[in-house]
Image (tube, helix red, strand yellow):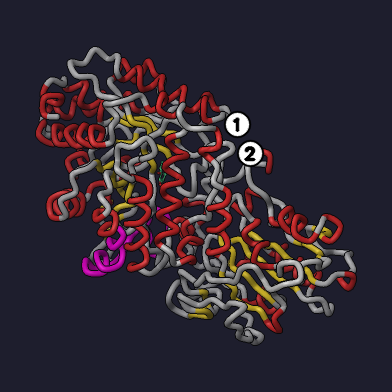
Amino acid sequence: MAAIVSHMTLEQKIGQMTQPDIRWATPDDVRRYYIGSVLNGGGAWPDMHKHAPPAEWAALSSAYYQASMSTGMAYPVPIIWGVDAVHGHNNVYGATLFPHNIGLGAAHDPELVYRIGRSTARAVRATGITWAFAPTLAVVQDQRWGRTYESFSSDPALVRRYAESYVRGLQGDLNGAGDVLATAKHFLGDGGTFHGVDQGDTRVPLDQLIGVHAQGYYGALDAGVQTVMVSYSSWNESGEGDRGTRMHANRYLITEVLKQRLGFDGIVISDWNAIEQVPGCTRTHCPEAINAGIDIVMAPEDWRGFIRETIEDVRRGDIPMSRIDDAVSRIVRVKLRSGLFDADPGAVARQFGADAIADRALAREAVRRSLVLLKNNDGVLPLAAGSRVLVVGRGADNLSLQSGGWSRTWQGDENVNADFGVGESLLTAIRHTVGEANAVYSETGADVDVRGFDAVIAVLAETPYAEMRGDVAYPAPMAHSARYPQDLAVLDAVAGRGVPVVTILYSGRTVYANDLINRSDAFVAAWLPGSEAGGIADLLFRATGGAAPYDFTGRLPFAWPRTQCDSVGRGVRFPVGYGLSYARAQRVSQLAEDTRADCAH
Ligand code: GLC
């Protein structure tokens, strides 16, 4: 490694530290500027072909790889491609989508998470990519945050156990054909911002930062994680003022704590244009971030300016060459460890079959294990196998609503069911179970006489979101029906008519739902199950002539709020660990309904 680095020019070193998005850098750019890494952000595909098959991904990977090996460097350094494979290989048409992390947290099963990591790594390698920007290790403290669903739990101990399992699943032996680099993100305290504001201010003392928000990193480091992504957020130890130090300029935590005290010898990468948020910086110029310990800068579009201005910084002495050499040494070290020097990942990908991006049985199992039964009065569930059911609600036949953000696109929107190339909606799964004629669908439930049915199944949902677009800004109430009144209207159209109502809620967070729960005889928190909603049908119906083939095992990974203004851990309707089952029934009485217009009063 030392020989490789010592033979590199300054331009070649800075090129290694630069990560453009594939939309703004061609293989020839990689060759000419010695670029060491690319990513495809959410909603980017080869040639912007949304339905690109794995072979097209692998071909582009080979093109980047061959370009990186044709730079004329004394010792060519292969490029590495990173992708947000955060619930399966979610950008890729035909790839199975696992439940988002909040649902995996409800399963309380690190071994399941290990298997999902293994499956995801195989899918990612089948497209010629060798780096996954996962897992998110946020320990969310306020479900107002638009990224709550990317968190496993508010319980630091669970996050630590999952971090280790997920990283082991993704990285395997590091250099196998089915192994990818994992990314512990976002360092540090992303899930603890004031009022859950995305990219906000985490106002906690050091002992809480370590005791709550850092626990996942201990698990990831124990598993040998090779990369860490820095958080947009700030750490404000005193809690004074409106913002502490941006994590992207926090040398104490990145270099002194993570690298020196905890001995992390892999790569620290910045987030998407995040360096521009450091006071005095722009997206093309931030010596403070590199001096803080960032080794690769994610500069998606303006990477040429970043290379030019950073070279100038080094020549002026604003960034010591020792820091550059440390960063490049870490990059080369990780690439050597991952076997990247040994073979073109695009060529390796061709050994996988087209089915390598699918793992529907595992995803369906994960869905079953993720579901939390909050209410089941009078044993309404499980329903008889041959039940005649009315299915209502906008989530019933919509793969986007059941998958959430980071699904084929960044926000998980702008998709129709045909854009997924795999999977089934809950309506389809119910029809497979009870027969086409026994499952009638009405999105609103209006003008339908429910008395002709054995039960109503209402599938309610949040509209997909990612990052800041999912924030519920304080003081808005955290009531689902405040943001989606059409879901309450559906229940009002079908409830109280002598036919049991089973409500399934797709949500990326725990929400105030007393009004919805009161109008339901059974209520299931389904989180964001991904492509395989059949796992939900598996728990709703008995097998023909027998008992239910499966029982609910999911338990809340976050507290369920009592009022519409309670964030995680304060007013609690159902505590972390709550979850009913057929074996353990419990009546839920009518709940007090909170109708405050906002949470400021
Ligand atoms: C986003 C996210 C980060 C993701 C990166 C690349 O802004 O914060 O989790 O890995 O950009 O898509």
Q: In this view, does 157 lie to the left or right of 317?
A: right
| Part of the protein shown in magenta | 190-216
| Figure label count | 2
Would you say 350 lies left or right of 448 here? left
What is the secondary structure assignment of the residue under circle 2?
Answer: loop
Neighbour tally class for label 2: few under 14, some 14-19, many 20 plus, Cα within 10 Å: some
Examine the rendering and report whether any part of residue 134 can be seen.
yes
Question: x, y (%) of residue 599?
Answer: 52, 73
Which residue is at a point 34% across and 53% down the rendered structure image? 233
Residue 235 falls left or right of residue 394 = left
The residue located at (40%, 54%) in the rendering is: 114
What kind of residue is marked 1?
Answer: His
Q: Residues within 10 Å of mark 1 (few under 14, many from 20)?
A: some
Q: Is residue 430 a member of the stretch shown in magenta?
A: no
Residue 51: which numbered mark, if any? 1
Sequence-wise, which precedes: disc 2 or disc 1?
1
Q: Position of residue 217 (x, y in %)?
A: 28, 57
Look at the image and tell me in which quarter the N terminus lies: top left
**Which of 357/397 is in front?**
357
Task: Return the residue at label 2.
Answer: 421
- Marks 2 and 1 in Cβ contact (< 8 Å): yes
At x 36%, y 38%, the residue is 131
Is 508 in front, or is 541?
A: 541
Above or below: residue 490 compared with residue 88: below
Residue at point 63%, 84% (across, down): 588
Relative side of 309 to 517, left or right: left
Within the image, what quadrant is residue 368 found in? bottom right
Up-down: is 287 above or below 161?
above
Q: What residue type is labelled 2?
A: Gly
For the residues labelled 2 and 1, the Cα–Cα distance comes to 8 Å
